[in-house]
Image (cartoon, rainbow, N blue to C red):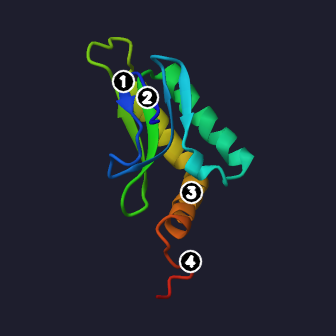
Amino acid sequence: MPEMINGYDFDLTKSDSVVLCGASSYVQKYYFNEKFKRLPDEIKDELKIMCVSFAEEAGGILTLEFDKSGNLNFCVRVDDGDFYFDDIESGLRISSYQRKKEELLSQLELFYKVVFLGENVDGND
């Protein structure tokens, strides 16, 4: 059964992207895609801290999603009429994560490209 967070369907078969994880300020819930259970616990913990702290501070729903090419994207969704969502805080936090967690995010992209997309690590075809 697909995971629902505040009406957002995290059914991975319906989307062009693959959700790695996410958190919602609306229902105070964290989601982790079990297809990534092979990731080390330290990485899973770091992802949880990032998503939950984002949701608590900026509001809305944050998901980390891989696109078809294997790029990891920060996706923010906000309910209509959510006057508590802080757009500036959202942008600042995402920029901060992209800078401070650059190595982690790059490693996650590489993991996804190798394990899920079957790309060659050394770049040779």
Give the CA distance from mark 4 to mark 2.
34 Å
Residue at mark 3 = 108
**In this view, 101 is above or below 54:** below
Secondary structure beneath label 4 = loop
Q: Earlier in the sequence, mark 1 or mark 3?
A: 1
Give the CA distance from mark 1 to mark 4.
38 Å
Q: Residue furthest left?
A: 80
- The residue type indicated by label 2 comes to Met
x, y (%) of residue 48?
61, 35
Residue 2 found in image quarter: top left
Asked whether disc 2 touches disc 1, contact meaning CB atoms under 8 Å apart, the reply is yes
Secondary structure beneath label 3 = helix
Q: Earlier in the sequence, mark 3 or mark 2?
A: 2
**Mark 2 crowdedness (10 Å alpha carbons): few <14, some 14-19, many ≥20:** few
**Mark 4 crowdedness (10 Å alpha carbons): few <14, some 14-19, many ≥20:** few
Residue at mark 1 = 7
Residue 47 found in image quarter: top right
- The residue type indicated by label 1 comes to Gly
Residue at mark 2 = 4
**Between marks 3 and 2 in the image, the one whose residue lies nearer the viewer:** 2
**Mark 1 crowdedness (10 Å alpha carbons): few <14, some 14-19, many ≥20:** few
x, y (%) of residue 73?
41, 48
Front residue of 13 and 104: 13
**In this view, 100 is above or below 76:** below
Residue at (44, 21) in percent of width and height: 59
Residue 101 left/right relative to 84: right
**Between marks 1 and 3 in the image, the one whose residue lies nearer the viewer:** 1
**Between marks 4 and 2 in the image, the one whose residue lies nearer the viewer:** 2
Q: Earlier in the sequence, mark 4 or mark 3?
A: 3
Of the numbered discs in the image, which one, if any, rests on residue 121? 4
Secondary structure beneath label 2 = strand
